[in-house]
Amino acid sequence: MRVHHLNCGTMRLPGARLVCHVLAVETGGGLLLVDTGFGTADIAEPARRTGAMRHVVRPAFDPRETALHQIRELGFRAEDVTHIVATHFDLDHIGGLADFPEAQVHVTAAEARGALSPATLLERGRYRRTQLSHRPRLVRHEPTGERWRGFAAARQLTSVDDGVVLVSMPGHTRGHAAVAVDAGGYWVLHCGDTFYHPGTLDGTSPVPWSLRVQERLAAHDIRELRSSQARVAALRAAGTEELMVVCSHDPALFEAARARAATGGR
């Protein structure tokens, strides 16, 4: 499968520039998106769609950064997006769902419960029901019973493509997941918001204080998050060339992924 790396939402915290790293994957059954970043409706109605959080993360709200605009630049139509896999339902990850109303939206069952029936104060504040008002075609998955690279709870999404795996990675949200995609010769593991900065994994690169604060405030379960981070760190430290670990918001990892894709994975 050919993988395109898109920035679907530049954001800024004090001392940190962020991206919304979205994968656009060419499969035999159409185009797959992993997350969507911000969409056209968010840009048209930022207050209603994103609320007060827009003052914290300060999105650019640039129409050229929407997934819809960028896939058109690649020669695709909105109708070509047949599947979307969401790492989780935070507002900067699903704002573009409404731009692809016919796509099936794959998510863990736990994340769907958290977004649609929030049980905690944090859940009630983080999810924006307006971004789901178009009633997306949700496909809920229980990622249990399968293993992927040492992760005990995974689910191969064969209805999407044999080379797409949903990997349970809770902590940031109740049902947060990573998505592994076979890019041909190597795998891309999109870890969503399991970590914001590679320094969280390697313990050497300095992590901006604003990202450390944001990580702690946004964590549904900080102990689960630390456990997920430890497993990703061990996987990344193994240093295999057959696996590229990325996250949603680090611009350096995003640029490295784009550069590797441009060379055919070498």
Image (cartoon, helix red, strand yellow):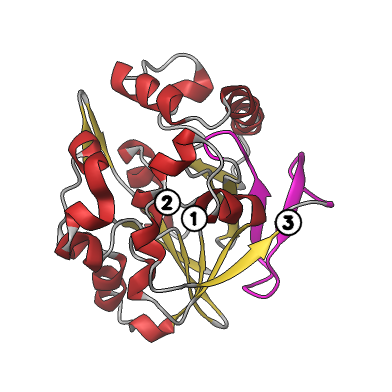
- Label 2 secondary element: helix
Q: Position of residue 104 (x, y in %)?
A: 53, 75
* Residue behind mark 3: 142
**Amino acid type indicated by mark 1:** Gly
212, 23: nearer the viewer: 212
Crowding at dot 3, Cα within 10 Å, few <14 / some 14-19 / many 20+, comes out as: some
Residue at 40 percent of width and 42 percent of height: 126
Of the numbered discs in the image, which one, if any, rests on residue 32?
none
Q: Start and end of the magenta stretch?
A: 145-173
Q: Is residue 60 left or right of residue 30?
A: left
Residue 150 is inside the magenta segment: yes
Residue 113 is inside the magenta segment: no
Residue at 44 percent of width and 22 percent of height: 216
Q: Compared to 209, does 6 lie above or below?
A: below
222, 185: nearer the viewer: 222
How far apart are the two marked residues, 2 and 1, measured between alpha carbons?
5 Å
